[in-house]
Image (spheres, coloured by chain):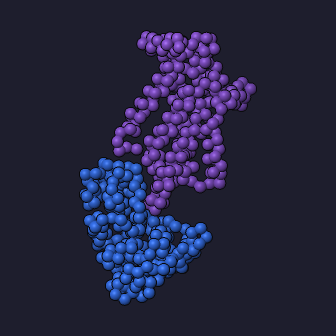
Chain colours: A blue, B purple
Amino acid sequence: MFPLIAENLVVEFQGKQILGPINLKINKGDIAVILGPNGSGKTSLLKALHGILKLRLGTVRWSCLKAESIGKQMFVFQTPIMLRRSVFENLTYPLLLRKTPKAQANHRAAQWVDRIDLRALMHVPATRLSGGEKQKLALARALITEPEMLFLDEPCASLDGKTTFEIESLLQNCVAGGTTIMMSTHDLGQAKRLAKDIYFLNKGTLESVQSAKTFFIKPLSQNASKFIAGDIVE
Amino acid sequence: MNDIWDGIVQAFTLIYTLDSDLIKISLRSLQVTLSALAISCIIALPLAAVLTIQQFKFRRFMIALLNALMGLPPVVVGLLVYIVLSRSGPFGVLDLLYTTTAMIIAQTIIITPLITSIAHQSLRELWSEYHDLLISMNTSHTQRIKTLLWDARRALLTASLAGFGRAIGEVGAIMIVGGNIDNATRVLTTAIALETSKGDFALALALGFVLILITIAVNIGTHWLSQTESEGRW
């Protein structure tokens, strides 16, 4: 399925170009973190690569058939979207979509409620969970399908330290299991903890792509230095 | 005032003594309306879901048309069904005029747009919430429709109860196509109309109270069965 290659990708919103042109390549096992100020196009880039945003120009290619790649990637949204069902049914939902036998789906969901520490709440409507619990559930609902590629849009925005830690552990586990991750964040600490490569995005343009190690010491773009220093990037 | 009091007393007497005519008429009312409701729901709910998720050429026009048809005058529907089913009409050979089947057809035509419109409103809200997730999970159209119908089931129940309310209290159309024939097509509403024109207000009122009781019982029963009001449910 890998590498994922984007060529001259351009996205428009209401006739205005908000992203691109972007060229990038994601290899298996990458942990790519997109950094950048608000409105820089992080979400659009993730959605465009995932294939749920219409491209104005350019291509997103996987090294396998599109139909095959679609089933092997999942997306976790910034605001978790909860199905109006119980926590448990939210977990079995993607499995049942893929025609997994019910017994097997239930078995895996039971494992996952333990992993995200929601066993006590498994029969509670998912919409009644707290923000952190919802995000954990959304992540578990994505990971339960064992995706090869996982996109996350600011998975820890407005979460406290403990939940952020739990989510990061889940992510590290799934990386260890061979999942490739691309996520956006504006939490520099999180980028330092997780990233292998940093994609710095500003005003819809990919200003720099470099390994996380060098990015924080010697960023290639001026705006990135400002961003790391905590200055306002214009 | 006396009439109302007499009506209440007579209503209780009729119910208490299990008056056979009253029971027959009430059961026929329920039979006609519930049949019409069942047929309507089979048409309206999937139609509402398709209108929600599918983009096609005359979609907006159809939604506007259905909204307009919510206020369809029953008498006119009755007249049209009468013409179609009458001896000289296209379906005259079926010999359906002045039967409960004709009444069911008329009521189905009256309440289907109503149920579709109300169901479409609630499904549209749910779809705007689910849209990104279901697109991202690469669900098929059938899976989307199933998910929406299932997760909005309580709102859809309200839509069908609105349809039930309109059908059970309807008199104009079924009077025309059913003919209010004793022991054959007489239902509560047509019986009330008849008794009123005969000047038997007490009996008319008694039947009216029974009609109201049935409506309330069906609504409460449905809510109780589906546990709409219990905490934490949808």
Q: Can residue B21 be seen in this view?
A: no
Residue A12 picture quarter? bottom right
Along the line of sight, the residue nearer the viewer: B233 or A8: B233
Residue sitting at 65 percent across and 51 percent down? B58
Quadrant where the image shows the N terminus of chain A: bottom left
Up the image or down, A135 lies above or below A61; here it is above
Q: Where is residue B83 in the image (x, y as percent from the top left)?
A: 71, 28
Residue A94 picture quarter? bottom left
Q: Can residue A153 be seen in this view?
A: yes
Residue A183 picture quarter? bottom left
Residue sitting at 41 percent across and 83 percent down? A226
Q: Position of residue A82 (x, y in %)?
A: 40, 55
Image side of residue B70 versus residue A2, left or right: right
Residue sitting at 45 percent across and 59 percent down? B133
Residue sitting at 50 percent across and 65 percent down? A52
Query: What is the total number of numbered labels drawn onto the structure image?
Result: 0
Along the line of sight, the residue nearer the viewer: A158 or A140: A158
Q: Position of residue A205 (x, y in %)?
A: 50, 80
Q: Residue furthest right?
A: B88
Up the image or down, A60 lies above or below B117; here it is below
Up the image or down, B82 lies above or below B200; here it is below
